Amino acid sequence: MKQKKSKKQRRLDALHHALQMELREHKSSFIVFYILRLLVILTLVRQVMLGSYESAFFCGLTLLLLYVPSWLQIHLKVELPPPLEITILCFVFAAEILGEVNAFYMKIPGWDTMLHTINGFLAAAVGFSLVLLLNDDERLTFDLSPFFLALTAFCFSMTIGVLWEFFEFGMDYFLHFDMQKDTIIHDLYTVTLDETRSNHVVAVNGIHDVAINGQSLGLGGYLDIGLFDTMKDLFVNFIGAVVFSTTGYFYAKSKGKKKTAAQSFVPSKKTEDADFLKQALLEAEDPSEEN
C-alpha cells in the first residue's frame, strides 16, 4: 500500500519540481548551468582526492550558489532574462572555482578587477530592477522618474561594493586571510614620520627594498597592505555601476521601448503560466485535506 505523504513532504517535493522546471525554462541558461555544474563536480572530486578540503568547501559552496538564481525566481516570482542569469552563473564560477580554487586571482593580472567591474554592473541591475518592479506595482501610488531609478541603481551598487570591502577587511583582520591583496609601491607620503608633529607630510621616494627584523623581503618596494586594492575595487565597481545606470536611465525613460544594454538585464514579474511553484503546489494538493 502506498504511504501517504505528509503536507511538509508534498511541499518539499513541489519546491523541487518547481526548481527543476525553472532550470529548464530557458534552454541557453540551462545548458550553461549544466556545464558549469559538471565542471564544479569534477573539480570537487579532484580537490577531495588531493586532500584540499578548503577548496572542496568552495566547490560545495559554488554548487549551492548556482541554484540561487532559479531559487529566487520561484520564490520572488520574478523572471530573470537569460543574459542576466547566464552572467550571474558565470560570475559565480569565475569567482569561486577559477578565482579561489584555481588561483586565477594570483595567476592572471586583472582577474579581480574584471570581476569587481562586473559586480558593479550586476549590483546596479539588481538595484534598478528592485525599484522598477516596485514602481510598476499597481498597489503603490508613487511614480519615480527615470533619473531617480538610475540614481538608486547606482547607489545600491556602490553600497554593495562598500559592504563587500568591509567583509574583506573583516576576514583579513579577524581570521588573518588576505582577501585585500597587497600592492608593491615605491613612494609614500605620511605625516607619521613628521618629527615636529605639525601635520607636515614627509615624502619617502625611491623605495626599492624593505627589511623586516633585518631580513630583506626582496619585493623591490614597499608592501602596501590592502589600501590600493580596496580603492581599485571600488573604482571599477563605480565604472560598472555608471555603465548600467546610464543605460538603465534611457531604458526607463523610453519605458522599455528603446533597446539598451539594460534591457537584457532587467527582470520582470512572472506571468501565471511561468509561476512554476504555484503550479507544482496545486498538483501536490491532497483532495482529502480540502475543507
Image: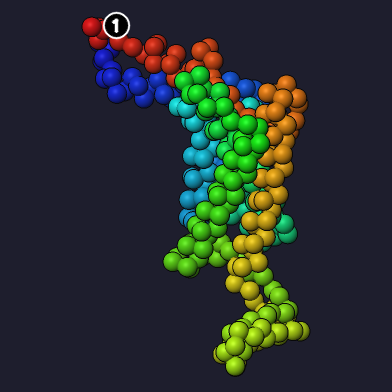
On the image, the x and y values in percent for residue 233 come to 64, 57
Residue at position x 33%, y 12% in the image: 285
Is residue 130 visible to us here? Answer: yes
Instruction: Locate the C terminus by quadrant.
Output: top left
Which amino acid, by three-letter code, is at mark 1? Pro
Location of residue 26 by image quarter: top right
Residue drawn 58% across the image and 37% down it: 126
Residue drawn 52% across the image and 27% down it: 142
**Residue 52 location in percent, x, y?**
51, 57
Q: Is residue 186 above or below residue 125?
A: below
Residue 286, placed above or below residue 258: above
Q: Which percent across, then down, holds residue 134?
A: 52, 28
In the image: residue 247, left or right of residue 39: right
Q: Is residue 36 visible?
A: no
SS at circle 1? helix
**Residue 189 rendering spot, x and y as whole percentages:** 68, 80
| Image: 111 above or below 184 | above
The residue tagged 1 is 287
